[in-house]
Amino acid sequence: MELISGTKIAEDIKNALGEQNLDKGICPNLAVILVGDNKESMIYVGLKENAARSISGTTSIIQLPAHITKEELLAVISTANNEQDIDGIIIQLPLPDHLAPWQDEFLEAVKEEKDVDGFNPSNRGKLIGGKPRYVSCAALACTEIIDRYVQSDKGKNAVLVGDSFDLILPLSLILIKQGFNVQVISEYKPEWIQNADILVVEKGSPKIVKGEHLRDGMLVIDAGFYWDSGKTHGNVDKDSVSKISGHLLPVPGGMGPLLIAKLMENVCQAAIYNRSI
Amino acid sequence: MELISGTKIAEDIKNALGEQNLDKGICPNLAVILVGDNKESMIYVGLKENAARSISGTTSIIQLPAHITKEELLAVISTANNEQDIDGIIIQLPLPDHLAPWQDEFLEAVKEEKDVDGFNPSNRGKLIGGKPRYVSCAALACTEIIDRYVQSDKGKNAVLVGDSFDLILPLSLILIKQGFNVQVISEYKPEWIQNADILVVEKGSPKIVKGEHLRDGMLVIDAGFYWDSGKTHGNVDKDSVSKISGHLLPVPGGMGPLLIAKLMENVCQAAIYNRSI
């Protein structure tokens, strides 16, 4: 399979956004609410800071102590909602254990107009009927690739493995409405994908998807992520799929950079909106 | 196939609600906003009036002239939102052509706490993450039947035909989260349903689903509705499926009465909530 460079596409998207921001004289500001000091979260926040800088934007990192209460966190979100200088707001997940039970309440508290992660129920709900202001960046990363690599959606078969609220569920709704036949399965089983034109595998285990399961011409999007001996892997065994024709968005260098680029698109859209009101 | 009596199950649900309302001394009031005098809509509104009466509830039919403007309709919805005596609000669809482009805006205007149709984006969005206050009655009618007739969801295959915002999209999300393998196809094709344990057919044409397409033991939910020579038909050819084992929720006497009973459940829940605040 031909490897799609998510990194390259992400760079192109960010370059275009950077030029657009310079042209319009806009410096979008993304607020990132980070509770505690989870190391992985700190890495992701760093990547978002770099991305914002690369599009001539800025970030406001609102770092809060791990022991903050529910009410205190809601108050911080409310302040950010009303802060004119903040264009978009994300809450870096996962939250500490004592706050996790209210995750949906926190996501709902981010006001729709600044909800650049597309996680507010009102933005999610408009995937079912209406037009969401923002869509989850993981789902957008997939549709970016599908738009580029799949000609004509009608009657094509998409198989999605997983059930996540940020990728699989919103993507399934988008693809159903585009006219794909969509199959969502809770675990990866090779016999289920024999007619797939598109395969998105979020739930699985390292290298579970083998070349012999696939057919020529497919588009495969690897949305898994595992660390092993200092290396990152996805769900797809890249070596074994090399002889199949088609395209693979691999791990690393695929979904990761792409979804940050799509987040930057949402942030720029939020900045334009914020300056228009 | 054994025919499931949606009428009988609906009666049982409404009887239980009626007793519960008498016990609690609650008389739930459903406001139905009806624009114009579409004959089919008038029939449906009549059925809802009867159902409300049967559970010791009432309806407030807010009948508006067909030529009402967008702003006037939004004002009516806003008044109903604030009216203490109204527990639940539905907008009878379809709207006249000149209002149809803003349908989503009207549905969004019904406040979440009174949105007994589950059509407000915020209620829909919580199907993706969180817990909706109300779920679309058509989807609830299907889950009522699936809960009764399908043992253990895990790994079962559900095939849904259609893409409607009130049935297929919410039902797909509910079933994915319950652990079903869910396939949503945009048109009925017999070769797609060979492994289905559950089949829900909303989009099709009269009697398109034949016995020879089905396998023994399936649950089939017919969500089609057609008039022909004074009779109602669904998507399933009842005669041809009679020799297959399994269960069929047929048309007529299936989804129709059931979804009104589920609406009454939502209205009673709204009434209890309204009296608690």
Image (tube, coloured by chain):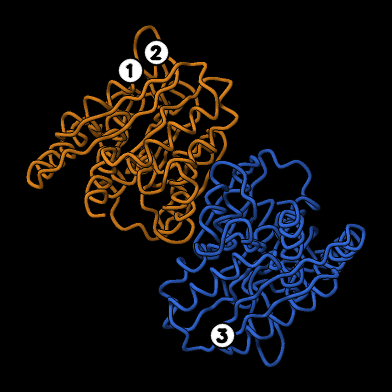
Chain colours: A orange, B blue
Q: Which residue is label 1 attached to?
A: A43
Q: Which residue is label 3 attached to?
A: B64
Snapshot quadrant of residue B34? bottom right
Where, quadrant-wise, is the N terminus of chain A in this rendering? top left
Q: Callout 2: residue from which chain? A: A
In the rendered image, the vertical position of residue A46 relative to residue B56, given as above or below = above
x, y percent for residue A86: 29, 38
CA distance separating discs 3 and 2: 59 Å
Tell me the crowding category of disc 3: few under 14, some 14 to 19, or many 20 or more residues within 10 angstroms, Cα based: some
Indicate which disc residue A39 carries. 2
Left/right of residue B119 with respect to residue A251 in the rendered view: right
The residue that appears at 48% across and 16% down in the rendered structure is A66
Label 3–label 1 contact, CB within 8 A: no
The residue that appears at 42% across and 56% down in the rendered structure is A180
Tell me the crowding category of disc 2: few under 14, some 14 to 19, or many 20 or more residues within 10 angstroms, Cα based: few
- Which one is nearer the viewer's eye here, B170 or B14? B14
Snapshot quadrant of residue A116? top left
Helix, strand or loop at mark 2: helix
The residue that appears at 56% across and 26% down in the rendered structure is A100
Helix, strand or loop at mark 1: helix
Left/right of residue A133 with respect to residue A161 in the rendered view: left
- Looking at the image, the residue that sits furthest to the top is A229
Amino acid type, label 1: Ile
Amino acid type, label 2: Lys
Label 1–label 2 contact, CB within 8 A: yes
Q: Callout 3: residue from which chain? A: B
In the rendered image, the vertical position of residue A23 relative to residue A97, given as above or below = below
CA distance separating discs 3 and 1: 57 Å
The reply to whether residue A200 is visible in this rendering is yes
- Which one is nearer the viewer's eye here, A16 or B26? B26
